[in-house]
Amino acid sequence: MNALAEFYARHSQLIDQIGINAILALSLSVSLQAGQLALAQAAFMGIAAYVTAILTLTYHWPIVATILVAVIVATLVGAALAYPVRRLRGVFLAIATIGFGEIVRVIANNLGITGGAEGMSGLPQDANTATIYAALAIVALLLFSLSRTKFALAVALVREDEHAAAGVGVDVGTVRTLSLALGGAIAGLAGALYAHSSAFITPTDFGFERMEQILVWCVIGGVTSPLGAVLGAMFLSVLPELIRFLADYREITNGIILLLVIVFAPGGLASLWRRGPVRVRV
Amino acid sequence: MVAQQLLNGLFLGAVYALFAVGYTLVFGVLDILNLAHAAIFTASAFAAFSLAAAGVPLPLAFLGAAAVGGVLGVLLDRAAFAPLRRRNAGTLVPLISSIGVAIIIGAVLRGIYGVDERHFVTGALDTAQAIHLGPVTFTTVELTIFVAAVALMVGLSWVLRATTLGRRIRAVAQDRIAAALLGVDLERTIAATFFIASSLGGAAGVLTGLEYNSVTLDMGSPIELKGLAIIILGGMGSVTGAVIGGFIIGAVETLAIALGLSEWRDAITFGVMFVILVARPSGLFGKRALRQA
């Protein structure tokens, strides 16, 4: 028990990060499951993190209320974003949403209320490991219960063939809007928790690099599998710590492992235990 | 004042266009986004720095570094794209493997050069002659960079239009299977495409390094996403579109600076891109039909 406590004391920050990263990966997997390569998760996360930070620092709201409001805001932004990009698919959707993320980052970089490029500091760091993992569990439970509904069936249908989906009466636009809103909500939750567990936030925390990371987790884990997304996030969050002893060769090893996994298992980690041919489509 | 800003936009746009042409060429031929393009851009700038530091004259260092970029591009294809091509892995998975290669290139550069900013040692860059032409002023360095970028793009257009290799590249871009049936060696054509695209991206990196006389590890990150905006603006896969898109984005940025909106210029650039995508997803020169990827 003592050893466990010591392990936790030493790695609690990493453990918290892994939890938040897993929520982020789940958020993107919602879009990917609907076949939508919408890469705005980092922006949703950032918007929620700033809402949280402003409510906490300026208005001294309690933590639960800030998280709730941040999630609602991110959900609405996700739903609103769905409308202008409704005709875009594939890389076009990806690039439009990346552009949206850049716009959000530049705005955060220039507004007074967000603290500009220096961001906001002095956050209370009041989200502990239990809070973060409880949030992860709630998200996982929510997605699991959703996976047994007709909505999940419609989502899968939209992913495999939009025209066929429309042909059997699925409202493709609504499915896309809902999946973006749900992705926004989950990424918003991660962003709010991020703000509550970091001492400070800056616009670069929510830039393209973060988005790239989230996408890598999901694809390494297995594009259409939520469990894979969580595994990918955990594996790639822990990996840099595991190879810390390589010191100067750490970054390059990280890149090589990423390349090897994706080249030898293009279906992701989730495909390794799934039988039958691997299908990767997005 | 306006003339000067437009000229600055032209200089900036030429380098943007050169970078974007390589991006769009790979997309046109393979339908994949190559996120290692900016890493090669940076690697070539460092290669030029090393060559110049070793005493190689700048024009030769420029060509040598562009060739280094080309070779890196071929290796990138071999490591990240070719194995996935054989498995028919779609478009998303190669995106991730190119991120892996970008991480590796970045790590190697950091290992060799460290994190400090590097400057070309030749004094000619800092004492460049200023040319006054009516209302506008520019330096010989700016002019040379512009001419080099335009010459490379004209050269590319000639290669694509008038040579056997160009016809092969266009054939593969249009229909890979039909091209293979007609006897085009796919792998060699794709390797040549990567060499050309990456040497142009690398050349853009060298020119950017020369323009500001500064070579840094993160010099590729701003242009990486702007390159995406440019190829969207021009129409994915369209080389002409990428060139014109590069000049448009260059002009938009310098005008934003002239209007005192310097801090907001990236948001304006991506705002323009977003509006274009929403209003006309195929871009200015892309196919009319909504492209699925």
Image: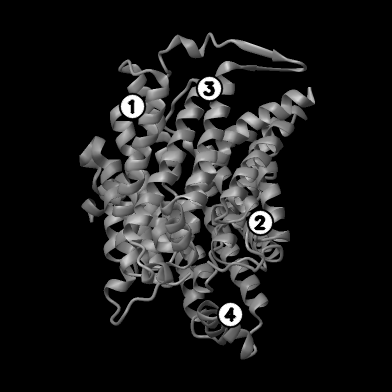
Disc nearer the start of the sequence (3/2): 3
Q: Which residue is mark 2?
A: B283
Q: In which quadrant will I find the N terminus of chain B?
A: top right
Residues tagged by mark 4 and mark 1 found on one chain of the structure: no
Q: Is residue A264 above or below residue B65?
A: below
Mark 1 → mark 2, Cα distance in angstroms = 40 Å
Q: Label 3 is placed on what type of residue? A: Tyr
Question: Of the numbered discs in the image, which one, if any, rests on residue B114?
Answer: 1
Q: Label 2 is placed on what type of residue? A: Gly
Q: Are marks 4 and 3 in contact (CB under 8 Å)?
A: no
Residues tagged by mark 3 and mark 1 found on one chain of the structure: yes
Q: Label 4 is placed on what type of residue? A: Glu
Mark 4 → mark 3, Cα distance in angstroms = 48 Å
Q: Nearer the viewer, residue A154 or A134?
A: A154
Q: Is residue A254 left or right of residue A113?
A: left
Element on which disc 2 rests: loop
Q: Label 1 is placed on what type of residue? A: Gly
Q: In x, y percent, where is residue B121?
A: 40, 13
At horizontal 54% and vertical 65% (from top left) the residue drawn is A90
Residues tagged by mark 3 and mark 2 found on one chain of the structure: yes
Which chain does tag 2 point to?
Answer: B
At horizontal 54% and vertical 58% (from top left) the residue drawn is A39
Element on which disc 3 rests: helix
Query: Does the image show residue A205?
Result: no
Q: Which residue is mark 3?
A: B212
Q: In x, y percent, where is residue B42?
A: 42, 34
Q: Which residue is mark 4?
A: A162
